[in-house]
Amino acid sequence: MSRSRPWRLRLDPAHFGLREAWLLKAASYSVSSFRYQSGVEAIRVTCGRGEIVWLPFLGQQLWDWKIDGRSRKFTGFVETPARGRTYLQNYGAFLIHCGVTAMGNPGQGDTHPLHGELPTAAFDRVWLEIPAAASGSPALCGSLHWHVPYECDYRCLVRTTIDPAGTSVGVEVTVRNESGLPLEAMYLAHINFALAGAALVRCTEKHADGAIRIRDESANSGARAQLIDGALRLAGLRADPEFVATIRHGSALRQEEESRLVLEDGSSFWVRHGSALLDHHVVWITSTPDRGACGFHLPSTAAPDGLAAARTAGELKLIPPRGTAKMAYSFGYNDAEQRGKEQRNG
């Protein structure tokens, strides 16, 4: 009898050694495991033109994403992941899950760490979902039980899927409130693309009441007008230490919001999200002689200004007792020729 449903391969820290070893090899993908010198466990998935390095136990971070052998993440940040560090001391992943009890820069009255507990949380259970079809690709999954007496009790499930071509990735984040009291929740997907070679950000233009909040700490006088017009030109843009803008979609949230990062060669990256709870997205850019990053579309539940600010602004998402919240988003890459066909047909 042929197998129609995917099966699970449970991962244990004992599966990871300093020497990289194969876990799975199929016609359309391969999976190997290794351990950084710091001791952090990692999974490498090669699929089509793509390659992902996943940290299954450390925050479910995607440490790197390569297309055609080239890393597409920001530059000038931490090179090797490690445990026991703060957010900034370990700031080097392509995708970082932020939340759940807080998110953003702690503001006045806040006591939470930068971007909450998820970035450095140790996930309890991790596994691969192996597809039945030889032409498929594995899903990367993990579950965290976060219980702090007198404060919160929740479970977070992250499921990451890779297109067989390796050029797009889908992420689902599910939070279940295990408490008998409502849970105030926040989330942000910190997706950190490289700035090198980037020419233009095309931002979603439809948002509620023109609600764009800009924290431009680098004093780029033209950035505000360009972003409001729906496009931000990156040539010559200096952002030191950073340019941050929050777009609140609110009631104007469409079935799917999308932004694109257009590169100088005509190819592009895109980020899409369609979950009602992710009713914001953040634009984050930093550009100095030492680092470059273009987080051109970070799906989020609120502005990244900390817990107290989100509570004041009414942006916290309440998960009812024993209730569940689900959020989903995706990102991908288009070749220049493919993008041109889309424009002609669209």
Image (cartoon, rainbow, N blue to C red):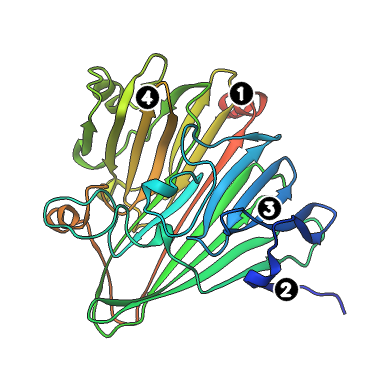
Q: Nearer the viewer, residue 232 or 95?
A: 95
* Residue 1 can be seen, yes or no: yes
In the rendered image, the quadrant that contains the C terminus is top right
Residue type indicated by callout 3: Arg
Q: Earlier in the sequence, mark 2 or mark 1?
A: 2
User: For the residue carrying disc 3, how many other residues have a C-alpha within 10 Å: few (<14), some (14-19), or many (20+)?
Assistant: many
Mark 2 or 3: the one toward you: 3
Residue closest to the far front: 37
Q: At label 4, which amino acid type do we have?
A: Ala
Residue 183 in picture, x, y percent from top left: 26, 73
Provide the residue designation for mark 3: 44
- Callout 1: SS: helix
Is disc 4 placed on a helix, strand or loop?
A: strand
The Cα–Cα distance between marks 4 and 2, rounded to whole angstroms, is: 43 Å
**Which label's residue is closer to the chain start, 4 or 2?**
2
Give residue 340's mark. 1
Number of the front mark, 3 or 1: 3
